[in-house]
Image (cartoon, rainbow, N blue to C red):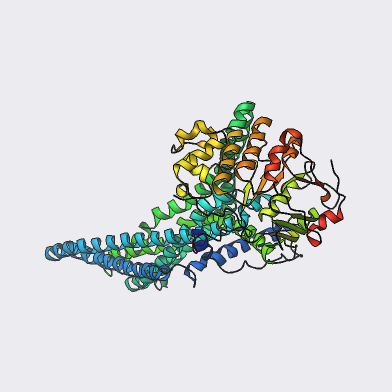
Amino acid sequence: MADPKFNPKSVDGTNPQAPETSRQEKASTVEAAPPPDVIEPDRELTPEEAEQARKRYLLTRFWISARGYWGRGGHRLAWPCSIGLLTLIGINVGFQYGINVWNRAIFDAIEQHNARTVYFLSAVFLPLVLGSVVLVVAQVSLRMTIQRRWRSWLTAAVIARWLANGRYYQLNLIGGDHKNPEARIAEDLRIATESPVDFIAGVISAFLSASTFIVVLWTIGGALTLTIAGSTITVPAFLVVTAVLYAAITSSSIAVIGRNFVQVSEVKNQAEAEFRYMLTHVRENGESIALLGGEEEERNDVDKTFANVLKQWALLARQHMRTTLVSQGSSLFAPVVPILLCAPKFLEGSMTLGEVMQAASAFAIVQSAFGWLVDNYPRLADWNACARRIASLMMSLDGLERAEQSNALGRINRGETEGDAMLSLNDLSVSLDDGTAVVKETQVVIEPGEWVLVAGESGSGKSTLVRAIAGLWPWGGGSVNFHADRRLFMLPQRSYIPSGTLRRAVAYPSAEDSWTLDKIKAALDKVGLDYLKDKVEEDAPWDHTLSGGEKQRLAFARLLLHNPDIIVLDEATSALDEKSQDKMMEMMIHELPKVTIISVAHRAELEAFHSRKITLERREGGAKLVSDIDLVQHKKKRNLLLRFLENPRPRPKGNTTSSKAALPQNKN
């Protein structure tokens, strides 16, 4: 396959030569509406009241996005499936009523010793049961289909927003309640979309069942006349009154007993998420922990985190025990109460055995309907907690999106350079999301073919400047401009190694079949990884197998394949020894003779490979560019750089060299 014209990172952070509708673009259209406006809490509220108001708003924020599944931009089958589910629920209630009537008829026939009717009803029962079973199975299938598609739709929307414009990275740099976003997207979002469908289906089914069988109880029971101490008391619709009172007692009991269920469940879910994060952190940093012998310390941290999980589980278990006490007691009493209530009428002959059994069945169904809250309160509390957690992530993404769309905090503009300049930073300032300046008023113009070294002490803003150039940092002022149609490639200090084959790792972020196997092997050979050529097609945990130096060499192999116009090296050779570092730089001089390079590094020996050095100095109010000098190369490497700088052009004068005009031109 020919070497593709792939743009790993263009000026605006996208790939203009990619297909018109990528998967991420499709997903990003799921939630096209702008983020909701910020709602500030009432200043008169106490901290506790403000926290409660925030939690209530979190549920609102979840539904703002989640209900879009049934909106104009939602899934085309959302409404047909929902209407179909409601229809099945209604038909199933009808079959329940049919079985209830069959109950009355069969017991009346048994009481009358009517064998013919008993045999007939026995034959009728099988179709009733089969019909009810088929309806329930279809109802479950349709309900889970809605849950699956809703989760897929909302997950695509959240992931698209999370991955867009480097927000997944920016979340690590800002404050807010968005810890462990991967757990929120994978687990909390699943529960947040599954439970509402169950709840709505359950509520509708309970309402229809209660309405239908309350009428049955009213019709069968009639009024009950009691004689107490010589006084006659008549209770109209006594079965209905009893059913409502019974349900009110059990529901109010569960509401009082489980009043802390939501809070306990939310804290438990947070503890579980922190435990998962701790285990993931240990796995990802396994080599460093093993080399330092930190197993005991990590074990202490893991044990401490897990102890918190067990503590929260114990509190949740107490809540479950209390609610189970009410629900189990209710389920035992419910079948007996109507029989006891109907016994006087049956004994006096005003009610048949069939009516007693029908009333008992109807009473149980009504109690089941009214007791829906009792049975599902724990799940409702769990959903509440999960919906709030995913809404917290949505709100953090809202904040990042608003920062991109407004200039309230200041935003770095991105555009195109004038003339032949490859990159220009025009009055660039970089700020935190709260407005605190990190880098101020940076003015730099980089010409094609220049190798520029960015230096400065730790904490002076070098890496922040790199993030701004890459488009990962939106806050600040001024502009970052690139030459039109030029391709930018970033090499961070920690080279990312995706899962899968070594071939995929070398080709990343392009597809592994974008280059032939021979070109992949040739790239590995040029960066000194020729001993891995026979393992190119091997699927292994390369992220843990390769050393830090090997990962950085592999990153340079990616450069050879993608052949970009601008390369930003952020401590990209820090894991290599000086000799290996020199080989990588020399390799780029030979293989990429026209490339423009911006390097962030601490090693002084790298100056020998660069034609220019700019220095940032940390100051109060933000780091500033304090020097911009041309470098004279050491003799032993000068001949190599001269090949790279062959036929140099004089640097343009005027506005394009404003940084040079503003700063002294020191010469070594």
486 sits to left or right of 615: left
85 sits to left or right of 416: left
Image spot of residue 155 (x, y percent): 50, 58
Image spot of residue 506 (x, y percent): 52, 42
Q: Which residues are magenta?
A: 13-21
| Residue farthest to the left, as pictured | 116
84 sits to left or right of 508: left
Q: Residue at x 54, y 49 (%)?
A: 509
Query: Where on the picture, by quarter, is residue 226?
Result: bottom left
**Above or below: residue 75 compared with residue 608:** below
Task: Name the chief secondary structure element in magenta.
Answer: loop
Image spot of residue 351 (x, y percent): 28, 68
Q: Residue at x 66, y 37 (%)?
A: 573
Magenta region includes residue 157: no
Q: How many marks?
A: 0
Q: Which of the pair 618/61 is nearer the observer?
A: 618
Kindly tell me whether residue 356 is visible in this rendering.
Answer: yes
